[in-house]
Image (cartoon, rainbow, N blue to C red):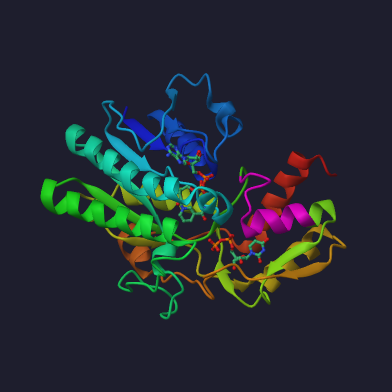
Amino acid sequence: MKQILVTGGAGFIGSHLCERLLNDGNAVICLDNFYSGSKKNIWHLIGHPGFEVVRHDVTESYRAEVDEIYNLACPASPVYYQYDPIQTTKTSVFGTFNMLGLAKRTKARILQASTSEVYGDPVCHPQNEGYWGNVNPIGVRSCYDEGKRCAESLCFDYQRIHDVDVKVIRIFNTYGPRMAVNDGRVVSNFVVQALRGDDITIYGDGSQTRSFQFVSDLIEGMIRMMATPKGFSGPVNIGNPGEFTMLELAEKVLAKVGSKSKLVFKPIPEDDPKMRQPDITVAREKLGWEPKVSLDEGLDEVISYYRDELNIK
Ligand code: NAD
Ligand code: UDP
């Protein structure tokens, strides 16, 4: 039985990962400061003999004996990460530094949850791992984008200098059950607004694109990346290449919910990337992985999840 540390384990993705790792027969330490995560996400796991929860901030060092570390701690929604941007940078940089130190001491393998945001507002489309990105280093998204870029840099330095077995994945927009109702990201916003009959808030003219991945596909990609041999560190894009404009997403959600909500157009947030689509050639070749869940199937699942959450029949 492996002892696995999941930082950010009470968050949206972290809670699905903890569940999968426990189901696979591992012991899991879920470490979280509950900044954007919630006990509700992991309530169903409490009492499992292999499950442990630790309230801790990754910006402080942490000691435990572990075999693997999944470093997910970091708010991911622009609303949350821009609320306290200095803490966001500290979380990515000091948090990753602390987890790499733990990996070095315990000789644990560590997977860093990086992001498509390292590509910024890309001029290369679709984005492959060789693209260095187009990131504003001083804008409102920099705390997240540059924090994650610095975290990647730390990972590769710990590999070169200390021979730490690092694995870096770049996650593209992921959605699914357990994203908080007030998370602020686009899929949860649109579905919740459509179910409540509220206006659908399109930022800008809605022509910007994103590629949406269902959470179960991401979890499979994470597990496969962690299982790759030592020496393979990535980075590897994990995302669904299906690309949609925000207007297309809004229309799909309205049609599926059967909602009469109106589209309202709001100002585009600063440095909002105009397009995003993963090139997943490396994931296909090195992990034998590709996404299985289409946006239509995934949306049906999240709509039914939020219907229950909001008690809307
Ligand atoms: P989330 O906000 O639901 O989860 C993040 C978790 O980290 C929360 O439980 C939060 O409380 C915890 N956390 C934040 N700061 C912490 C700190 N200082 N110490 C300890 N815990 C802390 O977001 P998510 O969507 O589940 O994202 C998880 C990870 O995946 C993040 O690292 C994020 O950058 C990355 N990621 C997510 C997406 C996506 O689309 N969901 C895309 C790219 C990358
Ligand atoms: N967006 C939107 N309405 C919303 C929330 C987001 O139009 O209520 C847009 C946002 O401007 C961006 C895209 O949806 O272009 C994805 O935003 P999200 O916050 O989900 O993630 P991002 O990829 O920007 O980090």
Q: Residue shown at 84%/60% (left/top)?
A: 258
Q: Residue shown at 31%/53% (left/top)?
A: 151
Front-most of 213 and 264?
264
Q: Is residue 231 visible?
A: no
* 191 is within the stretch colored magenta: yes
Residue 282's image quarter?
A: bottom left
Front-most of 299 and 171?
171
Q: Is residue 234 visible?
A: yes
In the displayed structure image, the side of residue 186 where residue 234 appears, left or right: left
Q: Residue furthest right?
A: 260
Up/down of 100 relative to 64, above or below: below
The magenta-colored residue range is 179-193
The quadrant of the image that shows the C terminus is top right
Up/down of 239 relative to 16, above or below: below
Q: Residue shown at 30%/56% (left/top)?
A: 150
* 147 is within the stretch colored magenta: no
The quadrant of the image that shows the N terminus is top left
